[in-house]
Amino acid sequence: MNLRDKYGIPHHAVITIAGTVGVGKSTMTNALAQALDFKTSFEKVDTNPYLDKFYADFERWSFHLQIYFLAERFKEQKRIFEYGGGFIQDRSIYEDTGIFAKMHYEKGTMTPVDFETYTNLFEAMVMTPYFPHPDLLIYLEGSLDDILARITERGRPMEQQTPVSYWEEMHARYENWVNNFNSCPVMRININDYDIVANENSIEPIVERVGYFLEQSRLLKK
């Protein structure tokens, strides 16, 4: 019996992985998808026409970038559900508005008018009964020190050059965001409670918890 059947996880479930940079969202996405025999959905960075422009001029391109992300994630969310589910999704559509667009607005790199336009569009597209929300959001959390250690360990040049103050702010923003998130059930996992890279069997307790959360959610809907 595979893990999906063992823990009663529906074959059409859609699970989103969320968390700040460095917590291991991609690793968890791949490991869960393999354990459940699900497909994966990753952010398409290489085809983004605004990223380079955005990094060169935040104020000029932040609105364009966020609108692009919103459109792409919305299309991907629709594709997942039209396919019939059975997906693990790396990063959610909710983080774009709750963290990144809000941060640009508060820092002055997105105008109040642009932020209001973006927020209104997001609410019209996503915060409706017709939008297919995930069955579960898995939030990967850890202390700031643990996350900084992981960022250092993986050694991506752009991340190494980023001031620690930025990671501190992102960590705080993510914690505030998830504490107020209610669009779907949330399951929190501390990154120190497992090591799916060194021990592939450590994914099973996570799958067991996923099955429990989905069952509790199903019972609450009755």
Image (cartoon, rainbow, N blue to C red):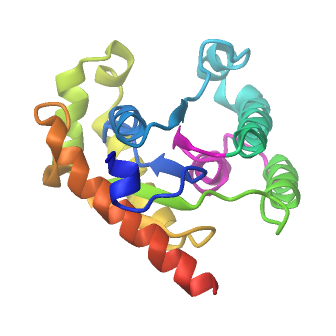
Q: Nearer the viewer, residue 97 or 43?
A: 43
Indicate the position of residue 53 as horizontal and vertical percent values. Answer: 68, 16
Which residue: 69% across, 18% down? 48
Q: Is residue 91 visible?
A: yes
Indicate the position of residue 180 as horizontal and vertical percent values. Answer: 53, 73
Indicate the position of residue 179 as horizontal and vertical percent values. Answer: 45, 72
Figure check: 17 above or below 71:
below
The image quadrant that residue 79 belongs to is top right
Q: Is residue 190 visible?
A: no
Figure check: 96 above or below 52:
below
Segment colored magenta:
85-112
Indicate the position of residue 190 as horizontal and vertical percent values. Answer: 23, 57
Q: Is residue 146 left or right of residue 110?
A: left
Figure check: 64 above or below 186:
above
Magenta region includes residue 61: no
Magenta region includes residue 98: yes
Q: Is residue 23 left or right of residue 69?
A: left
